[in-house]
Image (tube, rainbow, N blue to C red):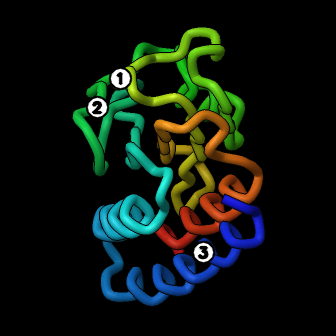
Amino acid sequence: MEKNKKDGRYSRIYNQLSELVKKSNSPSARMATIIAVLHHKMDTFFWTGFYLLENGAMTVNMYQGPVACQVLEKNKGVCWAAFNKKESVVVEDVHQFPGHIACDSRSNSEIVVPLKNREGEIIGVLDVDSKEKAAFDEVDARWLEKILELIYS
């Protein structure tokens, strides 16, 4: 998708989500709503969900798409890379990413965005997979980071 068109779509989604999340103060309700909207409004999103840290393990939480890996091997794969680097990671071809965890073989590209709580601590990640290679870029990273701020605002 061309960058201007993608920017416009994210802008509309952000405005919609800004209103929707006001209906509940529950982070879980906000996460579920964000996942549902993103998954159904963004054409290339094949798997959209959260992995949250539970007792030191990156454990699947709310998501939409095919069945996911329930617990990710520690310090392996894109989710742990984003968590450990404390920044969004965009992978154009997951098959070229060292230590990629293949929860679904149809996934070809991925973006992972750290999720911070009210105190600014990273408590997990938003993970989005696409069947298309190079589906994600800095436009996705910028908007998804902004959207995640709505959860604990």
Q: Is residue 11 above or below residue 19?
A: above
Give whichever of 125, 95 is nearer the camera. Answer: 95
Disc 2 to disc 1: CB gap under 8 Å: yes
Residue shown at the point (49%, 47%) measured from the top left: 126
Amino acid carrying label 1: it is Cys
Q: Earlier in the sequence, mark 3 or mark 1?
A: 3
Q: Position of residue 59 (x, y in %)?
A: 33, 32
Residue shown at the point (61%, 72%) measured from the top left: 10
- Which residue has dot 2 on it? 68
Give whichever of 37, 124 is nearer the camera. Answer: 37
Q: Position of residue 29 (x, y in %)?
A: 29, 69
Residue shown at the point (46%, 50%) measured from the top left: 45
- Which residue has dot 3 on it? 9
The residue tagged with tag 1: helix, strand or loop?
A: loop
The label shown at residue 103 is: 1
Q: Earlier in the sequence, mark 2 or mark 1?
A: 2
Disc 3 to disc 1: CB gap under 8 Å: no
Quarter location, residue 99: top right
Q: Is residue 99 left or right of residue 40?
A: right
Q: Is residue 27 above or below residue 59?
A: below
Gap between marks 2 and 1, in whole Å? 6 Å
* Mark 1 surroundings: few (<14), some (14-19) or many (≥20) residues within 10 A: few
Quarter holding the N terminus is bottom right
Quarter location, residue 36: bottom left
The label shown at residue 91 is: none
Amino acid carrying label 2: it is Ala
Gap between marks 3 and 1, in whole Å? 28 Å
Q: Is residue 6 above or below residue 17?
A: above
Q: Earlier in the sequence, mark 3 or mark 2?
A: 3
The residue tagged with tag 2: helix, strand or loop?
A: loop
